Amino acid sequence: MEAVIDVKGVEKMYRRKVHALRGVDLQVGAGEIFGLLGPNGAGKSTLVKVLLTVISPTKCTGTMLGSKIGTKSALAQVGYLPEHHNFPQYLTSRQVLRHFGAMAGVERKARNKRADELLEIVNMSEWATHKLGSYSKGMRQRVGIAQALMNDPKLVILDEPTDGVDPIGRRDIREILLRLRDEGRTVFLNSHLLSELEMVCDRVAIMVHGLMRQQGTIDELTADRSGFVITAATQMKSESLDAAKNAVRGSSARSKTHARS
Ligand code: ADP
Ligand code: MG
């Protein structure tokens, strides 16, 4: 397998001692759709940000597109949809795409043409001259995906691309991902939902608490379905329980303060 991403022992310690990645190994093969699955807070976005040098790792050795992580010529061949992206509301989708094309160094004529082709692909042509402020979440995600393709990337990294998208939009996004693979690109996507990955991914890795727990095809992983689904679900449940307890504690502490004042 020719590896497009090949990293070993990636660690990230944020300030205040949040150990978000605790020695992650990851190999993504050329031309595959690879899914990184894990509950919220597992470290998925942190890993992607390290690969793209949006944040600096505590430790990271390896390559992306055959070059050392952080090499500019390799980064220029990567398309990226960040999670919770927020493009200026006063721009139209056509303007957003042209702007990102310009930032990626695509020549004017080519980027204007590509912007319109991509709007067509993500089914947003009708909205090309409307401002983002009037778009639904799903429409913004479509523009975000188109934006990630402006530089004609070999590797496309999408962080939770279907977040907040309705079922029809999700299906459309799946079709776009398959199309990207057919064009010979490698696709890497993050999701906290197995359902978002199982229908499109050639291989999946499961991340929990900053560590890779399992990697393989969906068939390989679901052969022991009960095992990992319960692990991930229990994990999320206990985390949300803790969050709920803290919230209750916080609000009762606040109400006591109010009572006193
Ligand atoms: P995921 O994308 O899987 O939901 P993240 O990579 O966003 O997970 O977060 C992993 C862990 O790192 C979480 O505990 C999160 O709270 C923490 N974290 C993320 N970003 C920061 C930051 N800038 N500073 C401190 N901790 C962070
Ligand atoms: Mg995330």
Image: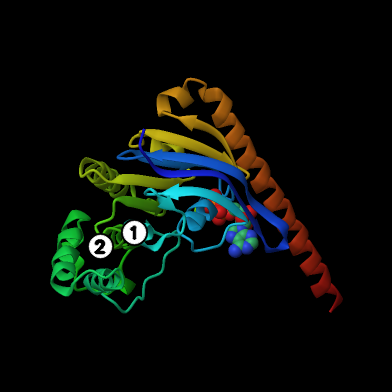
Q: Farthest residue in the right direction?
A: 260
Residue 146 in sight in this render: yes
Across and down, in percent, residue 181 comes to 26, 42
Across and down, in percent, residue 223 comes to 47, 20
Q: For mark 2, does the 10 Å Cα neighbourhood hold few (<14), some (14 to 19), or many (20 or more) residues?
A: many
Across and down, in percent, residue 45 comes to 51, 54
- At x 36%, y 57%, the residue is 74
- At x 37%, y 71%, the residue is 87
Quadrant that contains the N terminus = top left
Left or right of 209: which side holds 118? left
Left or right of 179: which side holds 254? right
Q: Label 1: state its secondary structure.
A: helix
Residue at the spot of label 2: 150
Closest to the observer, 65 or 109: 65
Q: For mark 1, does the 10 Å Cα neighbourhood hold few (<14), some (14 to 19), or many (20 or more) residues?
A: many
**Front disc: 1 or 2:** 2
> Upstream in the sequence, badge 1 or badge 2?
1
Residue 161 in sight in this render: no
Q: Label 2: state its secondary structure.
A: loop
Q: Amino acid at mark 2?
A: Met
Q: Amino acid at mark 1?
A: Gln
Q: Is residue 210 above or below residue 14?
A: above
Q: Is residue 72 above or below residue 5?
A: below
Left or right of 248: which side holds 36? left
Tell whether circle 2 marks a residue whose Cβ is less than 8 angstroms from ligand 2: no
Residue at the spot of label 1: 141
Tell whether circle 1 marks a residue whose Cβ is less than 8 angstroms from ligand 2: no
- At x 24%, y 57%, the residue is 152
Q: Which mark is residue 165?
A: none
